[in-house]
Image (cartoon, rainbow, N blue to C red):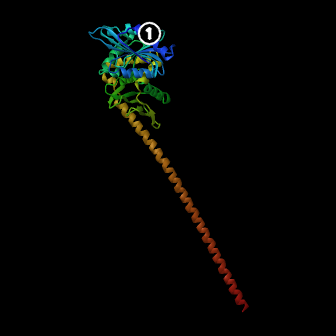
Amino acid sequence: MIIDLTDTTSSGIASALLQARRHAGSPAMGMVGTIVVVVDEASHHDAMKAANEAGREHPSRVLVAILRPGRGAPGLDAEVRVGEGIPGEAVLLRLHGELAKVPESVITPLLLPDSPVIVWWPGGGPKVPADDPLGRLGRRRVTDSAATRRASIDYSARAEGYAPGDTDFAWTRLTPWRALMAAALDQYPTKVTGAEVAAAKGNPSADLMAAWLQSRLKVPVEQRNSRGPGVTAVRLFTPSGPIALTRPDGAVATFSVPGQPDRPVALKRRTTSELLSEELRRLDPDDVYAKTLACMVERDSMPAAEKTVDATARKSTAAKVTAAGKKVAAGTSRKAAAPKKAAGAKKTVAKKTVAKKTVAKRSVAKKSVARKTVAKKVAGSKKVAKR
């Protein structure tokens, strides 16, 4: 059910929501929170679609606020949607004129009571989300630094103004990467001497990945540009060889551990609704993200030499990997040669057996010929005696 409201108020929108629920036959609310989406007119459709898809896992009231500040008269237009494939409730709000400068006055009366509020800025968000009027309403504040043109500059300011409850999709995109690298070190515990992150130029997720590795491993982490998409490779340099996770196509990655065969891993780039669903599963402050941001600020002031992996470490690692590969190849060649030797030995034994049989046959033939000759001589002597 869709209800259009022109030049309305917050109380009018609340009454329309109640009317729509009764008309749909479900006056009771089964929603777990409120998602406030701050977006522009051009991208509000995609943002509402992603929020509704995430609501299938977390039924919520979605309030999409389109701010239109200007010199015109203040006004509020709304579009209420209940049902029609929407798991919760969705309200599209267009705030005009001076009202767009105080959006919290419209949003606050529409929040679900005694439930968490998540504020999401799909277009990037403010530099300090906790200082934003709508950001103060949220328990979690979700931004997307990759949506801005100057992602690295805005993200540095956002890191310095971090407050508990802040998060960013650039960090959420790294969840499977961090899980796989942590699992690799659990399965193959070894000393890490350095690390490398390769990603498309200006990718904020690469900055976060490098900061996370440095804060956890206390080793220099080097960043390199690649063709993308997104993060394409993460390598941990160890004395036995690199532990690598490479994803050149944005869909399937290759997981490499020294001394083991390479393994393919499904690591596709996730959609916006999947990222938002992950953020809705956790509403408490992310301490690891806070430490990573602090390390990210430190890396901005570090000299380039401290963010570069030593070339000798790379060469020694490569040499050890090459030596290990030669040993494996030598072992393989020996294993391949062993069956050939065994086959040759079998052929020799077979030849000797055939030769013995041939000699035995010849000796038997000679004995039979000798017996026949003796018998002829005896027969001849008997004939002579009779004469």
Q: Position of residue 24 (x, y in %)?
A: 49, 17
- The answer to whether residue 340 is seen in the rendering is yes
- Residue drawn at 41 percent across, 9 percent down: 12
> Which of 272/290 is in front?
272
- The answer to whether residue 108 is seen in the rendering is no
In the displayed orientation, state which residue is furthest to the left: 71
Q: Using the rendered view, name the quadrant where residue 356 is placed.
A: bottom right
> Which of 73/256 is in front?
73
User: Image height check: is 356 above or below 96?
Assistant: below
Q: Using the rendered view, name the quadrant where residue 134 is placed.
A: top left
Q: Give the quadrant of the C terminus.
A: bottom right
- Residue drawn at 40 percent across, 8 percent down: 10
Q: State the SS at label 1.
A: helix
Label 1 neighbourhood size at 10 Å, few (<14), some (14-19), many (20+)? few
In the displayed orientation, state which residue is furthest to the bottom: 387
- Residue position marked by numbered label 1 in the rendering: 15
> Which of 209/301 is in front?
209
Q: Give the quadrant of the N terminus.
A: top left
- Residue drawn at 55 percent across, 62 percent down: 351
Q: Position of residue 299 (x, y in %)?
A: 34, 20
Whether residue 352 sits left or right of residue 253 in the image: it is right
